[in-house]
Amino acid sequence: MVLEDVRGQPLPAIDVFSLSIKALKDHLNSSVEIKNIALDDRKTKWVLTVPAIWTDTAKQFMRKSAEKAGIPRDMLTIALEPAAASIYCQTFPSAGCREIVEIGSRYMVADLGGGTIDVTVHEKIPNGTLKEVTKASGNGCGGTSVDDEFIQLFVRIFGGPIMNSLKSESPESYLYLLRSIENVKRVFQPTQTRKVNFTIPYATLDDLCQSNFGENIKNFVSSSSLACNIEICKDKMRIGPLFVKSLFKTTCDNVITLIQSVLQQGMVANVSSILLVGGFAECKIIQNSLKTAFLSINIVLQDDSGVIVLKGAVLFGYKSNIISSRIARYTYGVSICDYFNESIHDRKRKITQTGKIYCDNIFDPFLKINTSIQKSKKVFNRQSDWRLFASVYHG
Ligand SMILES: Nc1ncnc2c1ncn2[C@@H]1O[C@H](COP(=O)(O)OP(=O)(O)OP(=O)(O)O)[C@@H](O)[C@H]1O
Ligand SMILES: [Mg+2]
């Protein structure tokens, strides 16, 4: 897999991931070195977190990247982010949701991150551990999907070619714009009535307007179809508050729809609270939208929501046994070969071996989606099936 930077320059994803992990590792080493502590790689356990909705291949990729960064395989644990968050909330519950530590309580952990929204429902069972009630669900509607709406707004004002030029010819200005979007996202309040002052890479955009349209940026924006909501004032862009709010709407709606769809699943009943974790959970607009959409459920923002997954990962390193069962997100199986049966098998997969007729490549599931799996339980142990496969196939 290859990733691209803002200018479209490619770099293998494994390099990007392993260098990022290595930077964290080096940072830890240099932070403790100053305290005269030397870390022994053979004794340092690492916990890397991943969204619960990642595929097994993506989790495997993370493991490979960590190994490439110098973390020994046997000292690495991959933790699911909502599980890490849940362990933290169980250990240090916020004042508004202390009931989640009681036996029998059921609650949802909604990890609202940058790229993903990751939703899991946990139940505290009599032995004090947590069981996953439904398989983790999620979508790509994290905080960066609001950034995309802002970028689309700029495309509507200045046009795609100008924004592409900004990206390719002046990437530092483009990054400046992204940082400015981040700032607006953090400070904008749902009840805000005054216009939002948006810092933009003024000089670069002004140059691009002059060279492409023969007009300065102020005149160009005032003649655009969005002029009733947007104006240039000195070196800032001023945007009407309702217009800014509308840029959060699609993301908020998608988060609500996802949570609704999980709550409507048959096995999910009696969810008392939704614990909001992840950086995007600190966004006031999303908090308000969720409170309005789920009036009968206790919506609780955890203190330090942006770092709960990180803190929970440290706890996970010590007590990963607290998650006692999970729900399978996929159906797992093997490809087998069996005697051909006209009534059930596909003719296209009919093969002949040593005079006998078989059906090749039959998917034989050994674990079905939505099945509850106990921790440490070995699911695939069907030696006999392998023997059957081998003996049938080789006649
Ligand atoms: N106070 C805030 N208000 C609004 N958004 C915020 C705030 N703080 C952080 N964010 C947003 O939260 C997102 C980052 O959240 P987080 O750090 O949980 O993501 P991540 O774990 O890196 O991503 P992912 O879980 O998708 O892998 C960013 O989109 C950021 O803009
Ligand atoms: Mg996250």
Image (cartoon, rainbow, N blue to C red):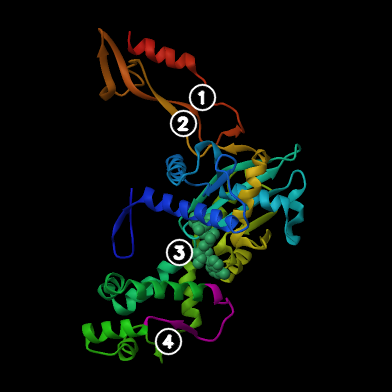
Q: Amino acid at mark 3?
A: Thr
What residue sits 31% from the left and 82% below the top?
204
Upstream in the sequence, badge 3 or badge 1?
3
Q: How far apart are the alpha carbons under marks 1 and 2?
A: 9 Å
- Residue 209 point in image, percent of width and height: 27, 84
Q: Amino acid at mark 1?
A: Phe
Mark 3 near mark 1, Cβ–Cβ under 8 Å?
Answer: no
- Residue 82 point in image, percent of width and height: 59, 50
Residue 239 lies in what quarter of the image?
bottom left
Q: Is mark 4 within 8 Å of ligand 1?
A: no
Q: How far apart are the alpha carbons under marks 4 and 3?
A: 22 Å
Q: Can you name the residue that lies furthest to the front here?
A: 36
**Mark 2, other Cα within 10 Å: few <14 / some 14–19 / many ≥20:** some
Question: Which residue is disc 1 drawn over?
Answer: 380
Mark 1 near mark 2, Cβ–Cβ under 8 Å?
Answer: yes
- Residue 273 point in image, percent of width and height: 68, 55
Residue 189 inside the magenta-drawn segment: yes
Residue 98 lies in what quarter of the image?
bottom right
Q: Is mark 1 within 8 Å of ligand 1?
A: no
Question: Which residue is disc 3 drawn over?
Answer: 144
Q: Is residue 258 visible?
A: no
Main secondary structure found in the magenta portion: loop
Mark 4 near mark 3, Cβ–Cβ under 8 Å?
Answer: no
Upstream in the sequence, badge 2 or badge 4?
4
Considering the numbered disc 4 on the image, is that residue within a helix, a strand or a loop?
Answer: strand
Considering the numbered disc 2 on the image, is that residue within a helix, a strand or a loop?
Answer: strand
Mark 1 near mark 4, Cβ–Cβ under 8 Å?
Answer: no
Question: Which residue is disc 2 drawn over?
Answer: 332
Q: How far apart are the alpha carbons under marks 3 and 1?
A: 39 Å
The boundaries of the magenta stretch are 186-201
Q: How far apart are the alpha carbons under marks 2 and 4?
A: 55 Å
**Mark 1, other Cα within 10 Å: few <14 / some 14–19 / many ≥20:** few
